[in-house]
Amino acid sequence: MAAATTMHLGGDQAARFESRAATRETPLVKWLILGTALSFFAVFLLMPLIAVFVEALRKGWETYATALVDPDALSALRLTLLAAAIALPLNLVFGVSAAWAIAKFEFRGKHFLITLIDLPFSVSPVIAGLIYVLVFGAQGWFGPWLSEHDIKIIFAVPGIVLATVFVTFPFIARELIPLMQAQGKEEEEAAIVLGANGLQTFWHVTLPNIKWGLLYGVILTNARAMGEFGAVSVVSGHIRGETNTLPLHVEILYNEYQFAAAFAVASLLALLALVTLGIKTWVEHRAAAAWRNSQDDAS
Amino acid sequence: MSAAKTFRVLPGFNLTLGYTLGYLSLIVLIPLAAVFLKTAELSFGEFWNVVTAPRVVASYKLSFGMSLLAAAINAVFGLMLAWALVRYTFPGKKLIDALVDLPFALPTAVAGISLTALYAKNGWLGQYLDVLGIQVAFKPLGVLVALVFIGLPFVVRTVQPILEDLDTELEEAATSLGARRWQTFRHVILPILLPALMTGFALAFARAVGEYGSVIFIAGNIPMVSEITPLMIITKLEQYDYTGATAIATVMLILSFILLLVINGLQAWTAKRTGRDR
């Protein structure tokens, strides 16, 4: 499931194909393919992105700024940051731990375990929210016990954090598992044999080898955590100033016909997406360079 | 192999595997099991009545139909985009390559309101389509547009690495044997790409079926016409009909599990066909 979200290290290959007659199309066909592909890209990806910013500024900078410093918007921003700040380290520890167990050791059921780790990717976000309602909601398994002890999880911040953890669950693990499998375990074994303990080995040997993959997973996790809508929507209860994240705040403003304000807050999230893509591209670039260096060293 | 079983040089196996299994169970497996246990409270007749109610069936038709169509559109245009990115030099290529992942990074609610603004009657695209008599926003066609948006990177990113790895020798051999360019594509390149293309199609389809945020703004959510299945779950939840919501979720989960198996199979096939690790 993760094929589309794992790091992509291919450099520009166009010259290789364009230099040979056998791997070239006639100019007409080439321009037809290129034109169609770029038009499709422009209509389906570029225009929605640009529209966010144009709509956000439609009523001028003042409306834009007002929407962003609105107390409800600021509290939504705080909750969004909080959810990401909790989900990220939890899934980071899990991802490293799962990758260590899966990549460095042989055991039965490994492929099945990887499939299970992938599950949250293939579950609808709405169901991701629903499952926590079934466990912690008023009618859920722990509902009566929780209300007896005056603990709120659903329609409260813990539910939002749980839903966020669920939807971002596989990202880091799925990035690290193939990477650490490809690197093998000889370097770590050498470190252990030379007297390093497990943590030293991880810190000084493994971590430098996986840092780009780790960073890549962290960026994707963060983007999804801050942008999640469906799962969070189910468990939030939409209490303004309390259980609204930024994406939910966008929905509320939009449904109240405050379009300029909705798009203003949305533009903040779109900026986050652009920064994410920027860092992601830079990480891929660095990782590709590191990989080429290691290939050169090997030969 | 046998040495690894009896004596492990590296430490931490029990700790990391134990933590992995514990965390996986707590966050994913046990809560997911709740769906099936809750559904089991219903008799089969009750379950069947919920999941085959006319409004729910209409939502399956819309969700599955539009998801299939969106995945097919993405398979065609995603392949062209991947082809252009790998094989041609053009200005702005690096930027476009990076922006292909936008649907992964852009929050779905943002995509939803933006697409709605574009395709509304007075929107940039909607005003021209309106002249042609085509309405997209608040119609089933709007669902399709949103699903095309979120599915595109899945096809591009699964096909692109396979295209990059392709040996030029294959095409040179085909050409020297007298094949025309189209024949080379049809009989040499496409068979190599097919497993990856189908994987991308299946990934885009799986994502589309469960998608919620980008769709609900543009769909209009008219009962029997433009309600997607995830919305039916939300509707039931808002009416405090937890068993009803869970029954529909069960249907979706079973489909997701089947798709997950299909995708795993397809990825294994891709790996075998191309010698790549997945």
Image: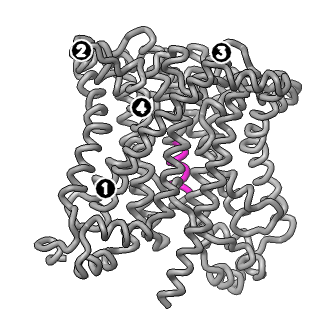
Instruction: Tell me the amino acid under the disc marked 1.
Output: Ser
Q: Which residues are magenta?
A: B197-205
Helix, strand or loop at mark 3: helix
Query: Is residue B84 at all visible to an observer of this figure?
Result: yes
Disc 1 is attached to a residue of which chain? A
Helix, strand or loop at mark 2: loop
In percent of width and height, residue A49 lies at 74, 40
Q: Quadrant of residue A77?
A: top right
| Crowd class of label 2 (few under 14; some 14 to 19; many from 20; radius 10 Å) | few
In percent of width and height, residue B250 lies at 35, 28
Give how far apart the Cα atoms at labels 1 and 2 are.
33 Å
Disc 4 is attached to a residue of which chain? A
Asked if labels 3 and 2 touch by Cβ distance under 8 angstroms, the answer is: no
| Crowd class of label 4 (few under 14; some 14 to 19; many from 20; radius 10 Å) | many
> In the image, is B255 to the left or to the right of B19?
right
Disc 2 is attached to a residue of which chain? A
Instruction: Tell me the amino acid under the disc marked 4.
Output: Val
Residue A97 — which label?
1
Tell us which disc is closer to us: 4 or 3. 4
Residue B167 vs B277, above or below: the answer is: below
| Crowd class of label 1 (few under 14; some 14 to 19; many from 20; radius 10 Å) | many
In front of the other: A77 or B72: A77
